Amino acid sequence: MTIRKLFEPNSVAVVGASRDSDKLGHKILKNLVEADFEGKIYPVNPKADEILGLKCYPSLEEAPKKTQLAVIAVPAKLVPSVLEECSENNVSNAIVISGGFSEVGEEGEELERETMEVAEEMGIRILGPNCQGINNTSTGLCASWPFIDQEGPISIVAQSGTVGAAIETWAQDENIGISKFAMLGNKADIDEADLIDYLADDDDTGVIALYLEGVEKGRKFLEAAKRAAEEKPVVVLKGGRTRRGAEAVKSHTQSLAGEYKIFKSACKQAGLIQVNSIGELYDVCKGLAALSEPENKDTVIISSSGGAGILAVDASEGLDVNLIDLPEKSVERLEEALPAECILNNPLDLTGSATAEMYDETIKILARYKDIRNIVVIVGDPIPGIADVIKERFERVTMVPVMLGLGEEGAEEEEELKDSGIPVFSDPERAMKALGAL
Amino acid sequence: MTIRKLFEPNSVAVVGASRDSDKLGHKILKNLVEADFEGKIYPVNPKADEILGLKCYPSLEEAPKKTQLAVIAVPAKLVPSVLEECSENNVSNAIVISGGFSEVGEEGEELERETMEVAEEMGIRILGPNCQGINNTSTGLCASWPFIDQEGPISIVAQSGTVGAAIETWAQDENIGISKFAMLGNKADIDEADLIDYLADDDDTGVIALYLEGVEKGRKFLEAAKRAAEEKPVVVLKGGRTRRGAEAVKSHTQSLAGEYKIFKSACKQAGLIQVNSIGELYDVCKGLAALSEPENKDTVIISSSGGAGILAVDASEGLDVNLIDLPEKSVERLEEALPAECILNNPLDLTGSATAEMYDETIKILARYKDIRNIVVIVGDPIPGIADVIKERFERVTMVPVMLGLGEEGAEEEEELKDSGIPVFSDPERAMKALGAL
């Protein structure tokens, strides 16, 4: 049974919608309204006539028959009966936000089993329980929190709401944006493989970011991941890579973290990109989302800072980045165009007296050579006009901008780039990792 | 001969002071004025009577006799004659900002030799040439750029202006601040060892950050570094760790990067803390600067996010951090104080329903146990009041706050912490690295 209506419903009911702004049933409704969800929203609450200006229904049964997705945020015990009401309705997918299921022990496990029996009987696919919902920015379906409405190519599947939300928030802050966001919760029904399958075929998704703690159905996951990785980059961060981390995983999501070595080598075979921290997960996805795909890995580093250029070179060791020697003819042209103090190597050091014009000339000359497909542009000093230079040539080659602790003086140029959706990296190492993963 | 007056002059002459705001001779003068340098400032420029409201002298010779430090930003060829004028004066130290010396080839090498001969004759110690000056925030001696005036315990010695400036700027932005900042330039006289020696004895310096590309006098460096490391933490980032990076070092600072393996093991023996990126250099220095020194490495992680807690555990592998089991008695007390859904392990998961009160109770209970000297506080959701909780107990144990992509909702609490000089880390991995280096 498809999960398409989970992400693309025409209408959504929020069961447990609340007037109390501290409650999740309120937050989710508010986010749907503020994200301007393009379908119908039906709040369900027997004690209210209206919430946030929307007509409220006493029960899901009484909500309009065309409800396609139910977001459920009522006490755990009431969830099975809510699902039963779905039979009267068109609901094909439900997100169970409520906690109090298998994550809290035996009694919860029993309730989760019961809930899933009802869901199966009703023919409803379930995300959760105990999850942070989903988001689809292209339709304003922010059935989740925090409030995120910036569209972009990153889609996130995570076994931790916070890890997923951090990626969402950084992507929103930097104008990179996200496409879809799904929190797994207890994975009583829909699991990472189902979601990866959907995202593999989703045209709006350019890169899939995964945070996983444990994978129960290994073969199903790897098949889905492999198929997805053939379509688009899939980046995975595993929680519980260490013995002690694996113990913590067991407490957190009752998942078996498994042997990391085995997971790692299986992911490699499936063609996934593996990262080791949240920061790296974001950096790599940001690069994949916002940098153009290079034809090859031949790379030149341009810098106004010799030191930062050297650190970029050091950081490229072991990465899939090929630092080439400058083509002889380009050196001749660069010699004519640039002041004598510039060091015409790779890294190409424009020195502290670099100007936007010097960057422009350099990039113009280098971009002519077919050998040079990637240019890392390190800006180590506040350089007025540098944003325009980068913007103008951003599409021609794969350009990776790095702006290094420029403070207020550099903030304006950085903002200008971000406003255009151009990713800026704050240190050369992070930029090289992103480039290496392209 | 001492270099004390380099950092602690009563008066400073800016030779080559300029009215043109694009010139370094203007920027430096402006920064000295704006940082409110507490001694006298003498601009030297034969073509101006006054710059930035200060009386201008036609030559260094005609400047008041009590000049102790000369900052020289005139064309390279004029530098020797400027130094000759120092004989008429009290100048004991000079900073040669001007480029055009050994970094530009044979002719420059000759000029540098000549310059150093004059300096020796005049009994003047030289920083540079071709350097970005120095800063001493405690006296407002910002004889450098960018403008940095936030006092703090980090002192920086760097062979790249940009790398040093990035650390300064981040430390200013986050209210951590710096004490001293010195750019090495061509190291014709004063080298890293001289500066480390001075900083080892400097009471305002709590941690020394080094960015080095090549060290010519290995033994002198290691002796100074070892002595300094006995007094305070010394953190080093080496540029040119790889073969290709070492080649770039040669072009940049004419330094021999040397075998990194040898450098690494020598630094280890000398007791230095070694890092591998600018970001890590900053994170580790920030932690050393602003976190209290723990009695031991016994650590508990508290988190509102199970996932982020697990990633912190994974990140601690291989670091000098000891994740302990919660003391049995503390578990009893925590059970009484916290809702049933909390997971009382290490990481201690307060779950997504965590409140500031729950953090407060938890920290209060844990801090009673002598076994627990370090608490990593991960805030994975916007939690009103959390800044006050962290501030109140920040001095009692070593507390490492992590705030993870909270966006606007969390920004206020984060600002409140930063305003109090409390360091906040943006991801668990970076925080654990900082803790490991304490």
Image (cartoon, coloured by chain):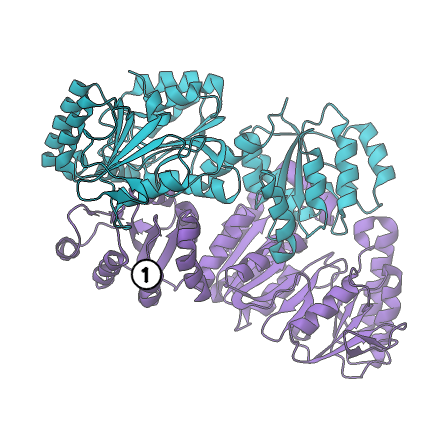
Chain colours: A purple, B cyan
Q: Residue at label 1?
A: A385
Where is A99 relative to B98, above or below?
A: below
Quarter of the image for the C terminus of chain B: give it. top right
In front here: A188 or B398?
Answer: B398
Instruction: Please tell me which residue is depicted at 38% across the width and 52% down the height of the picture.
Output: A402
Task: Name the quarter where the N terminus of chain B is drawn.
Answer: top left
Q: Does residue B303 appear in the picture of this structure?
A: no
Chain of the residue under the numbered disc 1 shown in the image: A
Q: Judge from the rendering whether residue B269 lies leftward or rightward of residue A105; answer left or right.
A: left
B278 vs A240, nearest the viewer: B278
Rendered image quadrant of residue A208: bottom right
Q: Is residue B195 visible?
A: yes
- The image shows residue B40 at horizontal and vertical percentages of 34, 31
As shown in the figure, which amino acid type bears the numbered disc 1? Gly
Does A191 sit left or right of A406 as displayed? Answer: right
Location of residue A287 with respect to B62 vertically, above or below: below
Question: Residue A257, position in %: x, y?
Answer: 65, 45
Residue A34 sits in which quadrant? bottom right
